[in-house]
Image (tube, rainbow, N blue to C red):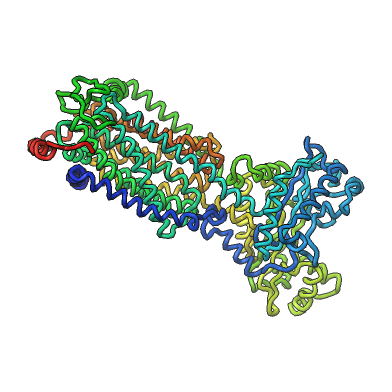
Amino acid sequence: MAKCKTDCIERPLSLAFDKFGFVVGRYPYVFLILPICVAAALGAGFIFLQEREANDIEDQFTPVNGRGKLERAIVVENFPQSEEFSQLRLSSEGTYASLIITGLQGENILTEAAFNDIIELDRRVKSITTGNTFENLCAKTKGRCVSNAILDIINYNAAEIGSFNITYPMNNDAFWGTTIGGVELKPHNSELTSAKAVRLFYFLDEKNTNGSSDWLDGFLKLLSNYTEQKTVHVSYFTSISRQKEFETSSDSVIPLFSVTYFLAITVSIMSCMRLDCVRTKVWVAAFGVVSAGMAVLASFGLLLFCGMPFAMTVATAPFLILGVGVDDMFIMISSWQKTEVNKAAEIRLAETYKEAGVSITITTLTDVLAFYIGLMTPFRSVQSFCMYTSTALLFCYIFNITFFGACLALNGRREKGNRHWLTCMKVPQATGDGGGCCVGGAYDENTDKEFEMPVDSFFKNYYGPFLTRVWVKTIVCLIYAGYLAVSIYGCFQMQEGLDLKNLAADGSYVGSYYDKEDEFFSAFGPNVMLVIKDEDFQYWSTTARESLDLCLEKFQNLTVADSGISPISWLRAYMQFGLNAGFNLNNETQFKSHLTAFLTQSGFSQDVNFTNNQIRASRMFIQTVNISTAIDEKNMLNAFRETAEKCGKLQTPVDLIVYHPAFIYFDQYAVIIDNTIQNIAVATCAMLVISLVLIPNPLCSLWVTFAIASVIVGVAGFMAFWDVSLDSVSMINLVICIGFSVDFSAHISYAFVSSEKSSANEKAIDAITKLGYPIVQGAVSTIAGVMVLAAAESYIFRTFFKIMFLVILFGAVHGIIFIPVFLTFLGTCSKSQETNKQNLPELSDTSQRRVKAVVIQNVCSADLDCP
């Protein structure tokens, strides 16, 4: 029954391809010119490329509607930006420039000589003029520019640096953990004896956007040319640096596109060349790569016309499209070479389409569906990539069965006329498996087919029989068990999250700054904001305050919080103020009547939203420690959010949220694993359904699904060994795994099931003979195409290369080693199909069609000219 259901779809589809191939072969010029015109017309959409570019890091690489963004909206609503600047209370990263200054040899930086250089550098930074001075643009407190405490304490006199006793990390109620790094303290107290790094900040007023941007550009220009360091090394960074470097990092990859297509064409041509000057497939191979290029042009142009954002991650899609297109091309060429050479080109193309059409349709459907499922991800960079890639794959498929099919038919006409591949001049008919520059057109007179290529003979006569031996199968199973064990182990070693410094090009000043920050300033993490958003919270109630104190204690007791630094709490300060002044702050009326005056005098006015005699929201701050790795960031985010939920379940609930601008980027940890697993699971199930529908054997369809899961596990596991983290960039590539693992395994599985051989081993040998070389061709050409990305200076493109390499390697190994062996274990897949009897009528039809083919040959190809 299952076989009937699948054959009811697979057989009509094969016949439909048979007829369509005949039409393409009969009218090749129509199917050649029309796709070119479509590609050219749609390619005009590239005029919109610049305005469609979507390179905003936050928008593209953080979850859409992430929790951090919702928390930021609450903070912005309740605590609008004040004229009095406070770095602690920023709802964003702010607009700033920063310097990390270290000794040239890693020595103590707290010396007079070093501070002479630091003060001079500070003077030059503040002297930058770009239409506006720093004084006009700086963020101000009490009418004065926000300054750096380390320079204020010595009154900008380097000689004073040794005369002060600085306690660390708190000095006179000011936090110095982000100002001085690499510290050494006296044994029994917190007094600072030496430090290896000093960090300076220059904050600008966020309201003056254009002026601030120009000044930051001037800062970058100054520091990039600054070479007068006598005793110190300087690393620099601005709030716009990460974005600027990200936008320019793709420039190094653009020249690689031409190299990629050159390599792909070269490898394709070399793998399809024959010594026979007629039977060689030079032009066919070249136009197969051109077809993939046309698909990219048409699909990207169409989506650009439609207004689809073009994320930088999409720039990797052409390499993938090239791989899929070339893979399908080799399948079609392989099927063409198995047709009888004396038939007319349209008959040969019809038989080629009937043989290869279903196979490439399966892989295209699964690839496209896998990428459309990828649209469910909450990362816009992934959504953009999946939309562009899936559409390009559809066009690649369409152009393969139209444009490339037409090229194949025209090449067939040339071969039918026994014309030279380069000059198109007729040459004498060759005899035997040979040829040369003056003779060609040889074929096997016993089968009326082209002579097998040496590699095909290798797979048929040596590799296939070798692989189906019992002891070889045993070794293959052991190797697979080892592969699976190593891969699963690697999956548990995988790191999560996208390190923002990886968005900049290698050797960028951004990377240097982040490295110094990790080295010297990782002892303290962000100062996290606790926002009480309950408008009905009774701050004057003793019970409510006790509940709040208990909540703060829970935060203080977290391993990621610094228990030695008290929370910054306006309420504690207010209660102390009331106690000293003799006010009864347990009374609502008195609590509210004195609050405004206290907030104005104490500097806490930005921490309480006191409107219409009601406290709508308030906030406090907890200092975190030892947040140096992605795992630390993830654990801190989860710990704070879980603690906030616990506070909401106290006897007197404290309804609060936790927020820091960095949480918007940390949100990726909350969704990346679950979302990746979800996408892969849904896509794999969809692949199973398609395979069940189109491959005429349910158990073999399960093997295709098994291969997908196996390749994904392998790639994910080996990612960890190759220093690739699970992030929105590598998530894209894991979606690619589904496509390529389907490509290789579905071709082999379909060939295995379709084989008319009698035993499982013979079926496996037959499938390997038909598709072993095309799979190797596709794998080698695709690896050659992406190999150039190994030289890219961008993490995104190098990651794409690493994972594509793993995907193609493991996919090909599954296709020509693991899957053929495993299929031989399925008795139901290897039955002789009662087929030889059931298919006798079909054989009769074929015989009749061959007679018809001879007539068509005589009528239609008597005077076929060379295209």
The answer to whether residue 90 is above or below residue 166 is below
Quarter the C terminus occupies: top left
- Relative side of 664 to 377, left or right: right
**Location of residue 282 (image quadrant):** top left
Closest to the observer: 332 or 483?
Answer: 332
Give residue 466's position: percent from left, percent from top.
Answer: 31, 21
Give residue 464's position: percent from left, percent from top.
Answer: 29, 24
The answer to whether residue 780 is above or below residue 660 is above
The residue drawn where x is 53% and y is 46% is 727
- How many numbered markers are drawn? 0
Closest to the observer: 437 or 693?
Answer: 437
The answer to whether residue 484 is above or below residue 385 is above
- Relative side of 472 to 647, left or right: left
Residue 51 in view (yes/no): yes
- Relative side of 727 to 279, left or right: right
Residue 642 in view (yes/no): no
**Location of residue 585 (image quadrant):** bottom right
Quarter the N terminus occupies: top left
Closest to the observer: 761 or 425?
Answer: 425
The residue drawn where x is 68% and y is 60% is 212
Give residue 554's position: percent from left, percent from top.
Answer: 68, 56
Give residue 484's position: percent from left, percent from top.
Answer: 44, 33
**Location of residue 357 (image quadrant):** top left
